[in-house]
Image (cartoon, rainbow, N blue to C red):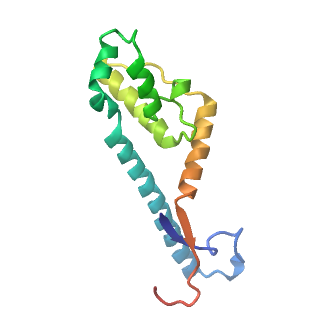
Amino acid sequence: MIKIKKSSTADTRTCDWSKVSKETLMQSSYQHIGDVKQALDFFRKCLENAGETHDSDKITGIDDFHADFATGFKQTGWWDRHRSLNRHHINFADGVPTDVNLIDVLEHVADCVMAGMARSGSVYTLKIPDEVLQRAFANTVELLKSRVVVEEENKQGGGE
């Protein structure tokens, strides 16, 4: 979980701005910067996890992968399972998870660019339906919100 402290003094919509000192505004700004860092650290960890687990079924299921590959993918048992097991094949309707997010989008981009450049020296035009991108955006907002716990402001002025 990402723990942040309630901060109502850095936004004119949530406080009486005429009563906020420069020092309080500075403190609230530092707090906000730290909060955003925590959120970006969370996304970084999600990306690291995506990289560490990317296409792992190519290794664990090499026999099935090779069986499909050896037919030029006329046989698709492994390939069909692969799209359901991995979150990043979002250019196929059956490869888009319900909770698709921007981590999946970035993994898709990385996958396609790295494969294209390594295999042929070029990348085919990448397209994702707008509704998938909008859902990924909304789901990423919800993913982050679900990880945040807001603690009350310390009004006493003391330490923890």
Residue 83 location, x and y as percent? 45, 27
Q: Quadrant of residue 81?
A: top left
Residue 130 in picture, x, y percent from top left: 62, 30
The image quarter containing residue 128 is top right
Identify the residue at image location x=46%, y=85%.
160
- The reply, left or right, for residue 61 in relation to residue 1 is left
Q: Provide residue 154's location: percent of width, then percent of height.
A: 56, 84
Identified at 46% across, 67% down, the residue is: 34
Up-down relation of residue 15 to residue 78 (above or below): below
Question: Is 120 placed left or right of 76 in the picture?
Answer: left
Q: Residue at x 39, y 52 (%)?
A: 45
Q: Is residue 3 shown to the viewer in this render? A: yes
Residue shown at 51%/42% (left/top)? 102
Q: Is residue 38 above or below residue 140?
A: below
Question: Considering depth in this image, is 12 or 160 the residue closer to the camera?
Answer: 160
Residue 123 showing in the rendered view: no
85 above or below 26? Answer: above
Q: Is residue 115 left or right of residue 10?
A: left
Counting the numbered discs, the total is 0
Residue nearer the viewer, 102 or 73: 73
**Does 135 sit left or right of 126 as displayed?**
right
Residue 127 % position (x, y): 53, 24
